[in-house]
Every structure is written in structure tokens, then in C-alpha cells.
Image (cartoon, grey):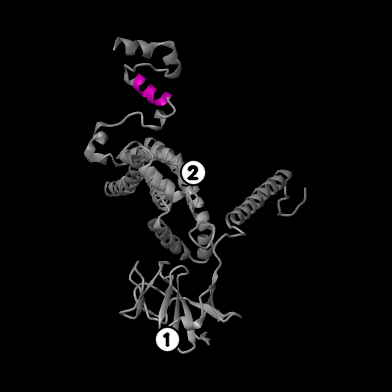
Amino acid sequence: MRLLEHIANSRAWRSVFRTGIPESNLERSEVIMNGLFLHVHPVKVRERSLRFSTTFYLGGISFGLFLILIVTGILLMLYYRPSVPQAYHDMKDLQFVVSPGRFLRNMHRWAAHGMVAVVFLHLLRVFYAGAYKPPREFNWVVGVLLFILTLLLSFTGYLLPWDQLSIWAVTIGTNMARATPLIGEKLRFVLLGGNVVGGNALLRFYVLHCVVLPLFLTLGVGIHFWRIRKDGGLK
Amino acid sequence: MNESDERPISRRYFFEAVGCGAVVVSMAGGGVWGWQFLSPNVLFEPSSSFRAGRPEDYPLGAVTFNPQQRVFIVREKEGYFYALSAVCSHLGCIANWRQEEGIIACPCHGSKFARTGEVLTGPAPRPLQRLLIALNEGGELVVDKGTAVGEEQILKV
């Protein structure tokens, strides 16, 4: 403990974390306010809102799953090439040749399924607790957008293994997009980059899955957390 | 200053309007370019038409499924051919010919079609697409999956 105290009071540590070990409530609030990441967090959290039965920790679990998905997803990207001759074999290689590729792929898959389920339960919890009411209306809207992004990530990731299941699932999914009034036909063409689920579609879904959608989701999560603080904490 | 009720357009307002107009025009241009960029002009997809062998290869009254091309070729009676797309009109799964029941059935959501392509049951909103079928100079059947035709178009050989 003496050593930790020594480190926490050293000049180098204090140049990064200005506050040091907080001893008063004021210093504790300063820890929150002085950091880029923590300043998004509410300064004060009521004990009641930390109880499991208040939130079931569903938002926190969603975020944890998202972090797992980022880490495992980046690792999977190192062995996966999004092109027609390679994608399926790269996926198989990840399962049978790369160690511990099977573990990472399964982790990505289960975390993805889990995230869809937990985000849904999170919305349900917020709905039944009436936590969407003023002043939290906007954060509810952000939350719904995050749920849609989660579903889109799940859908775009579905194509990447490039097996029969994914090709037919995306054939069906993009045929649903075709039912959009007026622009349906064009929308499907642009989404797939062609008329069939082929190489262009695979590349497009890969870019959406690995760059575009995670970028928007990260931005949305930032706004979502910051609004919790601005709207007066958890409910 | 003039005496009328109309406010003269100030220099500041004029430049604001020009500036906002320029932003709107360039954003619209960016939107059009973006859409064009996302719509490929050249596709490397398989050709939509294929040769399907000689008419006499098809037994009388048979529905023949071509799994590579996903097309049913039906020889209804002597010299009476039509081609049906096997792509289900509901959500695009490939329907199968069931010989024993004499129907075409989709495995995904249970749509059923008659051998003419008519919807019998299920969520499918439209009959199966009839495709253009013709004879080439060599006397072979040629089907074009890119060209839909009406039910009245029958190939008579």
C-alpha cells in the first residue's frame, strides 16, 4: 500500500492524474471531472441505482459485450479476407488451423447473439421502468437508434462466413429491403453492389460491419452515456 | 433608401444566401455522386441467358429443374415449352419440384405453386416468373433469366 501511495503521489503520475488518491467528496468528484473518459460518467451515483434489481446491469452488460466484440472482431480481421474465393476458407482456417481461432470466433458469435438479446432486454427494462419519460426522452431515442445499429451489425456480420446459411439469409434480407416503396429495387442494387449476393455484396457488408456501423455505434454510445449524466443519472 | 414596403436586400443577406445556396448545391451534388459511386456500372455476374439442350431431351409432360441456373423447364405437351424461374416470388429462396405431389414448393416459408407457376398457398404474393425461352440457330433451347414474359408466351416447337 505504501508503494501504491508512493506511485500515486509521484510527479509523473500526478502529471497524468491531477487529483491523486481522493480523500474528500470534492476530490472524488474531481477524479470524475478531470478525466476524458470518466467525465462522461455521472459525478454522483445513488446507492439505490447501483442495486442489481434497479437496472439488472443490462446497459453495462451490453457495453461489455460490445467491447468483447471489438477485441475479438479486430483479431478475426487479421485472418479473414472478404473476397469470394477466400472468405469461406479463411473462416474454416480460423476454426481448424488458427489457435485459438475457434475460441475467438465462437466468442464473437456468442457475444453478438448476446448483445442483441441484452440490448433488447435493456430497452424492455427502460420501458417498464418508465425511464424514457422526461427528461430522458432524447436518450430513449438514442437508445432505439443504438438497438437498430446493433441489429444491422448482426445482419451484416451474418454474411461474412460466406456459407449457404449466410448467402440465403442475406438474399432474403435484401429482398425485404426490395419491398421499400419507390426506391426498393435501387436500394437492393446499391446495398448488394449488383443483382445477386456476390463478391461486391460481401465486400460491402464487410466494410459496413467492420468500419461504418461500429463507428456510428461508438459515437452513439458516447452520446448515450453522456446523456445519462446530463439527464440526472440512472432511473 | 427607397420608399416602398419591400426591404432592400442587404449585402450581408445577399452573401448569406449565396453561401447557403452553394452549400446546398454542393451537398446535393455530393449526394448524387455518392449514389452513382455506390451503383456499379460494370458487373461481373454470370450471364443471364443459358443454353438448355435440345427440345427432345425433355420428356413429355415433365417439369425439369436446372439446379445451376435455378430454372424449371416445362414441356407441357408435344412442342409446348415454357420456362419458370425457381426463385420464389416471396423472398427469393429456390423452390423445388415435388414429383409425387405435382407441385413446386419453397422450403423457406412454405409457399406452394402449380406447375404453371400459379400460387396455390403460402406467403408468395405473385406467381413464379415466366422466363423468355426460344430456339437458337442450332436448334437448342435458350432461356434468358433477365427477361420476364407473360403466360401467353409459349414456345411451340
The residue singled out by tag 2 in the image is A211
Q: Assign a secondary structure to mark 2.
A: helix
Q: In this figure, what is the number of numbered marks? A: 2
Q: Is residue A197 visible?
A: yes
Residue A138 visible (yes or no): no
Task: Give the chain of mark 1.
Answer: B
Residue A197 % position (x, y): 48, 59
Q: Position of residue A50 (x, y in %)?
A: 26, 34
Using the image, determine if residue A76 lies above or below residue B60: above
Q: State the residue at coordinates (35%, 10%).
A: A6
Of the residues shown, which amino acid type is indicated by label 1?
A: Leu
Q: Regarding mark 1 in the picture, which secondary structure is present there?
A: loop
User: Which residues are the magenta region?
Assistant: A27-34
* Residue nearest the observer in this picture, B132 or B29: B132
Crowdedness near tag 1: few (<14), some (14–19) or many (≥20) residues, C-alpha within 10 Å = some
User: What amino acid does circle 2 point to?
Assistant: Val
Q: Residue furthest bottom?
A: B78
> Quick check: do tags 2 and 1 share a chain?
no
